[in-house]
Amino acid sequence: MDASATIDITACSVAQALTLERDLGVSFTVAQVLVRRGLSDVESARQFLAADEEHPAAAWAAAAGHVVNGVVHAIIGGIAIGIARGAGGSADQSGAMRAIKDNPLGAAALWLVAGALFSLWSTLAH
């Protein structure tokens, strides 16, 4: 970054930010960001914060994550049964990932597992 570069921050009305802080129950910092984004009235800020938009792709990705999570745990169960019958292995997530990797399409399957589990995590984290 150029040392002479500057960042321009939009002015923020303290009174408007305090109103949003009080009426919405958000921190003063969040209220300032809302005002700087042009959401200075309580109703538009409330609507923005509601985030009630639906994203079908995100729902599909989360569902795929649930399925993959179930498959991984089924593999862990299969490994545990194998260990109980005298076979070797590790009945945990690393053992399940190793079992997936050892298949002919294992590397591609692991990428799919990683993507689906990340989708599930990111959906649940928000």
Image (cartoon, rainbow, N blue to C red):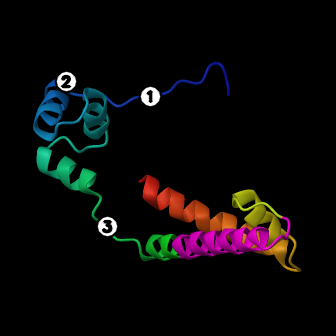
Residue 14, numbered label: 2
Circle nearer the N terminus (3, 2): 2
Residue at 44% across / 58% down in the picture? 124
Residue stretch rendered in magenta on the structure: 64-88
Q: Which residue is mark 3?
A: 53
Q: Secondary structure at mark 2?
A: helix
Q: Classify residue 96 by image quadrant.
A: bottom right
Q: Secondary structure at mark 1?
A: loop
In the image, residue 66 lies in the stretch drawn in magenta: yes
Q: Residues within 10 Å of mark 1 (few under 14, many from 20)?
A: few
Circle nearer the N terminus (3, 1): 1
Q: Classify residue 67 by image quadrant.
A: bottom right
On screen, residue 42 above or below 74: above
Extreme residue toward the top, this view: 3
Q: Nearer the viewer, mark 3 or mark 1?
A: 3
Q: Secondary structure at mark 3?
A: loop
Residue 8, numbered label: 1
